[in-house]
Image: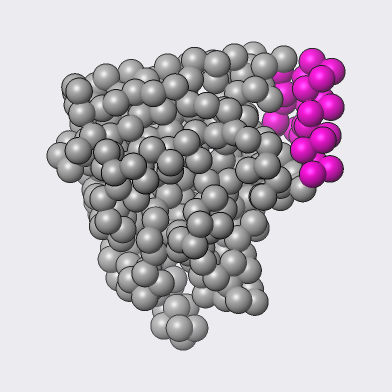
Amino acid sequence: MSILFLTNDLCFDHYPGKQHPERPERLMAVQQGALLSDLGSSLVQTQAESVDRNEILQVHDGRFIAELEKVDAAGGGRIDLDTKMSEHSWRAAQISAGAGVQAIRELAGGSYEAAFCAVRPPGHHATTDQSMGFCFLNNVAIAAQHLIDAGEKVLIVDYDAHHGNGTQDIFYAEPDVFFVSFHQWPLYPGTGRTEETGSGQGQGTTMNLPFPTRTTGDHYRMAWEQIVQPKVAKFNPTWLIISAGFDSHRNDPVASLGLTSGDYSDLTAEIIKAVPSGRRLVFLEGGYDLEALRLSTAAVLRTLAGDPTHPEKSTQNGPGREAVESIAQFHTMNP
């Protein structure tokens, strides 16, 4: 079995501005991480393709998309305070959104253990009708909706340092998506409280794990094993999508959590047990330290291939235990 690695050099052309943390060099670091994984012919690289517009419209409002297309036609412009479209950004965003649907079709053929979408811009902050937080289209949500439309039940696990507010918002009332977010609290965008658990038919299918600064990997693993995994098992997903934000790494300049690439290996190894081989999809989200990106990508790819590696030691004995206990208590009282 092999790992499918989807990327496209056109994603380098998205340029949000000088000194912007979501810079093209991020993608280069991730591609270098693929080489570092040393998977040889087991890592199959393919060119990510642009998304079909109809797939976008299954998730995003048509008027909102028309506005983005208008900005693109004008050569780019600022979407919000920290999200800027350059001349080629819309093309890159469409490729990033298309990678997941393309990966699902390839995985359905049975030739791959998992797929890793190494694309940018990221997507998990984009809501139905708003681009924000460096994100234009919600790549993960578009892939998940494609699966829902095919009758699947989807587990989305987001371990980016920032709460995946867009993904949560899109599926908050959706009973066939179980959304889990590990994130730093407080931090942008200010959502992701423990009490946010879904609504309507989706009540109980959203789970947030807000952690304090410097939280270490042992507490991530404890939370997964003791709190999340039992609920995931009850949900019984058929597909898994991971929003792999590597800004929870202790060296990241825009967040303050305490993980290492070894922790990403450990956590990913546990998460992927939730679904069978061949139904596992990973999307690059954040991560702004280039070396951390390189090491973490290598660690996750090796884990997906069934041969975990630890470029750095896993962490333990840092903050986070009280947060885990508080979250556990909430879910015990609100089963």
Question: Where residue 216 appears, x then y in whole percent?
Answer: 32, 50
In this rendering, would 28 be left or right of 50?
left
Q: Quadrant of residue 191?
A: bottom right
Question: Where residue 1 appears, x then y in whole percent?
Answer: 20, 38
- The residue depicted at 36 percent of the width and 75 percent of the height is 234
- Hey, which residue is sitting farthest front in the picture? 109
Q: Is residue 79 magenta?
A: yes
Q: Is residue 63 magenta?
A: yes
Relative height, residue 268 to residue 48 (above, below): below
Question: Where residue 251 appears, x then y in whole percent?
Answer: 39, 32
Relative height, residue 333 to residue 271 (above, below): below
Q: Quadrant of residue 202?
A: bottom right
Question: Where residue 223 appears, x then y in whole percent?
Answer: 34, 64
In this rendering, would 63 be left or right of 155?
right
In this rendering, would 280 be left or right of 172?
left
Relative height, residue 185 to residue 301 (above, below): below
- The residue depicted at 41 percent of the width and 28 percent of the height is 6
- The residue depicted at 78 percent of the width and 32 percent of the height is 68
In this rendering, would 95 be left or right of 60?
left
Q: Nearer the viewer, residue 86 or 141?
A: 141
Which region shows up in magenta?
62-86
Task: Please identify the quadrant where the C terminus is shown.
Answer: bottom left
